[in-house]
Amino acid sequence: MKHIYTILFVGILSASTTATFAQDSTNYLELGLTQNKTGNYADALRNFSLEIEKNVANPNPISFYNRGFAKYNLKDFRGAILDFDKAIELKPTYFEAFIARGQSYSKQENHKVAIQDYNEAIRLNPLEATAYFSRGISKSKLANYRGALSDYNKSLELNAEYAPGLAARGEAKAHLADYKGSIEDFDKAIEISPKRSSYLSNRAFSKMKLAEYQAALKDFEEAIKLSPDNADDWYHAGFCKTQLENFRGENGEKGALEDFSKAIEMDPSKVEAYYGRGFVKSKLGDPRGAIEDYTKAAEIGNNESAKIVYDAKMTKALLDELRNGVQDKVKIAEFTTERAEVYFNRGSAKAKSGDAKQAMEDYNRAIALNPIYAEAYFFRGVAKSNLGDQRNAIQDCSNAIKLNAKYAEAYYVRGIIKLALGDTTGCLDLSKSGELGYNQAYQVIRDHCN
């Protein structure tokens, strides 16, 4: 979400603002303050500069502070810091200037120094909500979410109706896996500011993490109405639709395929969207299209921010399907830093197209990227079996079982191959597979193990 940095506006006039030039009685400070309030920062800056020039012998910290405010809003953070430095030099107890300087450092991603300024502001005025909120933002940027949560709590004690504070706390709670608490905070933030699309997106994300996909989708779609150019929202809407098995839209409504395509249209480098669209194409019986999208995802997959993995549990895997490398992945689940899944899914699409050799090469690459990827070992084993390399197929199934002791399908395939090679211990594998819930194993046991 986008954090809102609120610089306190000081509207205090000082007696020192009386004109020192005999022929110039203009109150540039008053003009600048009015222009700051109306967002006319360039003109405000010029007037504060004139005020500072007029009173060079008797400088007013308020003039420097407000000129820094104008520079901050004009994105001149370095210049703003210099003005806040001067304001603090002239008035060491100027807690507002410490907050504003901290926010300027934060905009430069210098959060450790920013926190020092917020600490001093809190020491000078422990009842200023903005200081706690801003310090929480910097702690969040440093991934200190528990520390941030404490600051957001204090900020909201002092200003309970501050929507950005509620939203920031909701985001921190989501990072700490308190998704229900996160939703509660976003509920309140949205009640206060119902048109903030980022609040809806963040609430949707927490709902998604709780597997409340229909409710999450509703929020993502509302966020898209408010801000239709956000590729992330289109991607996540598509993600929710895959969970709801809405792969292709009907009756004029968009399905996951259309949402992923829209995300790609907006951000052609969005690897997660290529990956998701490849998954959907595979589900819709378009393995060639799936391979194209997985290949594109692999090409741009050096992007470490790409975070998506598909759950490997199969809901139907009859022996003939397994031995032909058909993979039926029902759900997608988010958030891994590995790119291995791109190659794994592309390999699965190739296997589905009947190219077991090319599929195995992709499984090899997936395993090289993630050596503890149980599903890649399993499906590589299936590919090896299809190519007639039964001994090594057994080894891959065994590796998958070592990594996931409850991998029912791996026991099943290993048992089948063992029986085919005359090894009756395959029946024990089939028994274990059935015990773990893979009911097809019992048919084979009845036919070949009794």
Image (tube, helix red, strand yellow):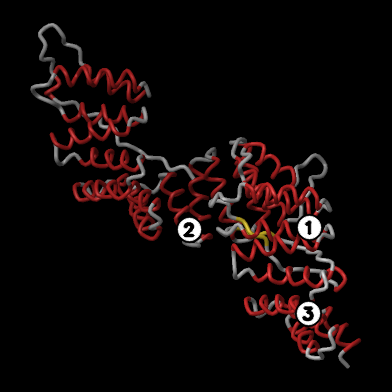
The residue that appears at 65% across and 80% down in the rendered structure is 405
Residue in the foreground of this view, choosing between 190 and 331 = 331
Mark 3 or mark 1, earlier in chain: 1
Which label lies toward us, 2 or 3?
Answer: 3
Q: CA distance from mark 3 to mark 1?
A: 22 Å
Image quadrant in which the C terminus is located: bottom right
CA neighbours of label 1 inside 10 A, class few (<14), some (14 to 19), many (20+): many
- Residue hosting label 3: 412
Amino acid type of disc 1? Lys
In this image, 93 relative to 211: left or right? left
- Residue hosting label 2: 175
The residue that appears at 76% across and 82% down in the rendered structure is 433
- Residue hosting label 1: 350
Secondary structure of residue under mark 2? helix
Which residue occupies the extreme bottom position in the image?
A: 450
Which label lies toward us, 3 or 1?
Answer: 1
Residue 172 at x, y percent in the picture: 44, 55
Which label lies toward us, 1 or 2?
Answer: 1
Residue 272 at x, y percent in the picture: 63, 50
| Position above or below: 192 against 410 | above
Secondary structure of residue under mark 1? helix
Secondary structure of residue under mark 3? helix
Amino acid type of disc 2? His
Amino acid type of disc 3? Tyr
Mark 2 or mark 3, earlier in chain: 2
